[in-house]
Image (cartoon, helix red, strand yellow):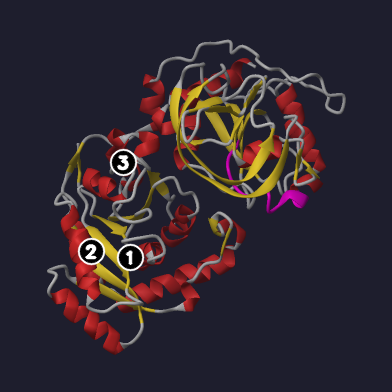
Amino acid sequence: MVISVPRLVIAAPSSGSGKTTVATGLMAAFASRGLAVSPHKVGPDYIDPGYHALATGRVGRNLDSYLCGTELIAPLFAHGARGCDLAVVEGVMGLYDGAAGEGELASTAQVAKLLRAPVVLVVDASSQSRSVAALVHGFASWDPEVRVAGVILNKVGSSRHEEMLREALDESGVPVLGCLRRAAQVDTPARHLGLVPVAERRSDAVDAVGAMAEQVRRGCDLDALYALARGAGELSGAAWDAAEVVASSPPPPLPVPTLGAAPADPRHRPERPRPQTPDGLRVVAVAGGAAFTFSYAEHAELLTAAGAEVVTFDPLRDEQLPDGTGGLVIGGGFPEVYAPELSANEPLRKAVAELAFAGAPVAAECAGLLYLSRELDGQPMCGVLDVSARMSERLTLGYRDAVAVSDSALAVAGTRMRGHEFHRTVVEPGAGAAPAWGVRAPERRVEGFVQQGVHASYLHTHWASQPGVARRFVERCRTS
């Protein structure tokens, strides 16, 4: 199979240069021309893909060579870009920045090479003129396998400033494909973990994306950018397919041992997991809404391929789990922002606890871990785990190599996965009698909780790297 989708990688010398503004604006501008645009984000970030989805009407997808391995970058790209006229890939950090101590691994440059895609460098020109040529020359010549094929100048102050920048770049040999003036209306609000997700400000986010598109239309040569995208090299290989990878993954050993089971809680009456739906599928409820916005699209696709009916619910609004729920997935997000509202929804908290105490499989990552705790910043949560959670001044951030310590609904002990941590909270204690993971970096430690069917941890993982996780989880739903 030959993959020939036109594609561009939008990169920058550093964070804060305007990648998200330019990439999202390009996606929206091309989509408004009637093109089917496939949006992608290098790295583990969950928030930018929400803006990409708003710009294109398609699911934003991540391309992370640390979490998934280099061999999956092209297949995952092809899966997301199937049937599209153009793909726009937003980079992460600076062009050559990647996983600490791992060379080019997980960098935008590496992904651009794996996709054989031209790179457009977004440069914050607000405090320079002729020096911009030296900067662009350095980035364009650093790695001859990375094709820096154009520059978009951002935060240009005036017509005279633009003229000086263009004159300097004439000597670099890298064409200027756009010039954007400073525009406050495209700024998006941020807080302790980055931009505020789309789900929390949808109306304002729609306006912001519209402003980005208009700025890009006015300042960029869209025809030249599309021509550049069409010159991307062909890729060979098959697109990633959830059904195929689930079918080829090893069958999960069953039954799963119950480890570190919690004592009976008199406040919650255990009940058997609800029956399967008439067609034989097991409902897997996935937390969504404003408090739980972090998820990779491939997780739901893998669960579906494994035989689940995936139903989204909102813990801020829904007082019961979806009918027929046999398993529960609670991903990342911002429960600390919505702790009072989550706590006030006592019927749902009780339903989650009853499902967990009955032994049904529950996969909780980061925000999910906080929601299952006894309390978060003094607000009662589900009480599934006997831990207390609170906000912290310290940012915990980085890639992690991990190994499963305990058999669980997700993995057998010894399973190796790579993950990512990104939070400003702490839980006490940090691990249970049966920990979820042993983590190698930045220090050796165990973390997380395996308790009956619950697997709860701070670690965000990408199941495409281990599709057997989804198959095992759904099988556990069927046999609980």
Q: Is residue 348 magenta?
A: no
Label 2–label 3 contact, CB within 8 A: no
Q: Which quarter of the figure has residue 353?
A: top right
At label 3, counting other C-alpha atoms closer than 10 Å, the crowd grade (few under 14, some 14-19, many 20 or more) is many
Task: Identify the element where label 3 is drawn.
Answer: loop
Which of labels 2 and 3 is toward the front?
3
C-alpha gap between disc 2 and disc 1: 9 Å
Identify the residue position indicated by label 1 in the image.
Answer: 30
Identify the residue position indicated by label 3 in the image.
Answer: 105
Q: Amino acid at mark 2?
A: Tyr
Residue 126 position within the rendered picture, expressed as x and y whole percent measured from the top left: 36, 77
Nearer to us in this view, 449 or 308: 449
At label 2, counting other C-alpha atoms closer than 10 Å, the crowd grade (few under 14, some 14-19, many 20 or more) is some
Q: Residue furthest bottom?
A: 160
Q: Amino acid at mark 3?
A: Leu
Residue 65 position within the rendered picture, expressed as x and y whole percent measured from the top left: 34, 39
